[in-house]
Amino acid sequence: MSELLERIEGFPRVSLTHAPTPLEPAPRLGELLGLELLVKRDDCTGLAFGGNKTRQLEFYMGAAQAENADTILITGAVQSNFVRMAAAAAAKLGMDAYVQLEERVACVDDTYHNSGNVLLDDLLGAHRLSYPEGEDEAGADRALEELAKTLKDEGKRPYLIPLAPDHPPLGALGYALCAAELLEQRDDVDAYVVPSGSGATHTGLLFGLRALGDRTPVYGVCVRRAADLQRGRIARHCAAIADMLDLDVTVDNTDIIIDDRALAPGYGQLNKPTFEALRLAATMEGLLLDPTYTAKVLAGLIALAREGTLALDSRVVFLHTGGQPALFGYEPVLRDWLGRSGS
């Protein structure tokens, strides 16, 4: 067993993930792009519609159980996949969940606030709260810290899953493990293309690969903030994981590849390349993506292929992190884009 895996074994963890998830070819889309395209199906992780956050939650819920917590608190966007899956994990483990939904996306309608992941949060029995600011991670965490104090006074034992980057990226350990899983499935990959939002998935996979001696490029496609801001976040997370695991692994700045061309006009908002990616995946591979994360990541991958950064005939893994329930929250927006495309 590698030193990386031995160190990770020392952290409390609960089993929530159907792993290994499939690594399957996308031949029609790959042929269009001139690539051997593979999809890592982390939308198939098994918990409450699946998604990448299951791997992260194994460590957060493990820590919560180690502290004998009976309640979890988490903050995220209105259509947050992380929030939905945390509520599901809490239900599965017999815990209460308080979920705080942040207003990150402007110009949305009632469907966005009531369908998709929000409906699932309610079905899962979560206590749903609102936070008015969408770009105030520290403030959102502070609001939950105040709620945690109140819950403690009521006799509860709360565990808070933080959002701001000044906390150790515990959930990233799930994707350090996923790096080993991917290398077991294919060790001849030329590039990985992944979402880069909170940074836990991007950081964990990148750090895990480097700790295991693999130098394959990892392209992080921005879904939340611009590349210049995201690059520093990933660098800090990588250093924090090295400290958490007490491993002498350095991720060089040249290793942190960030692309933000698919981001505008901002988090959770569609643009033409993102809609094109969403439609291509659906019509060519029967693969459903979401407007906030996976469609933007595929849009970034398409741009990298078309400009030649991803070389012709190279073997590329697209990390599908799930998020399909959000499609229903975006129904009016998607109908509008479908109309524009003549469908």
Image (spheres, rainbow, N blue to C red):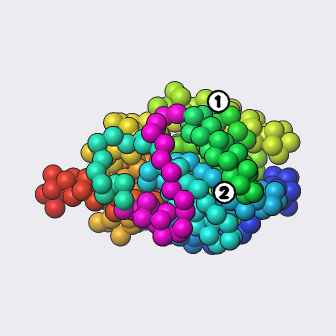
The reply to whether the magenta stretch includes residue 130 is: yes
Category of crowding for the residue at label 1, using alpha-carbon neighbours closer than 10 angstroms: few (below 14), some (14–19), many (at least 20): few
Q: Please give the residue where the numbered disc 2 appears in the rendered image.
A: 72
Q: Position of residue 21 (x, y in %)?
A: 59, 69
- Of 125 and 48, nearer the camera is 125
In the image, what residue type sits under mark 1?
Answer: Asn
- Of 260 and 46, nearer the camera is 46
**Secondary structure of residue under mark 2:** strand
Tell me, for residue 169, which label it has, or none: none
In the picture provided, is 284 more to the left or to the right than 118?
Answer: left
Q: Please give the residue where the numbered disc 1 appears in the rendered image.
A: 253
The reply to whether the magenta stretch includes residue 254 is: no
The residue under the point 72% across, 62% down is 70
In the image, what residue type sits under mark 2?
Answer: Ile
- Quadrant location of the C terminus? bottom left
**Start and end of the magenta stretch?**
115-136
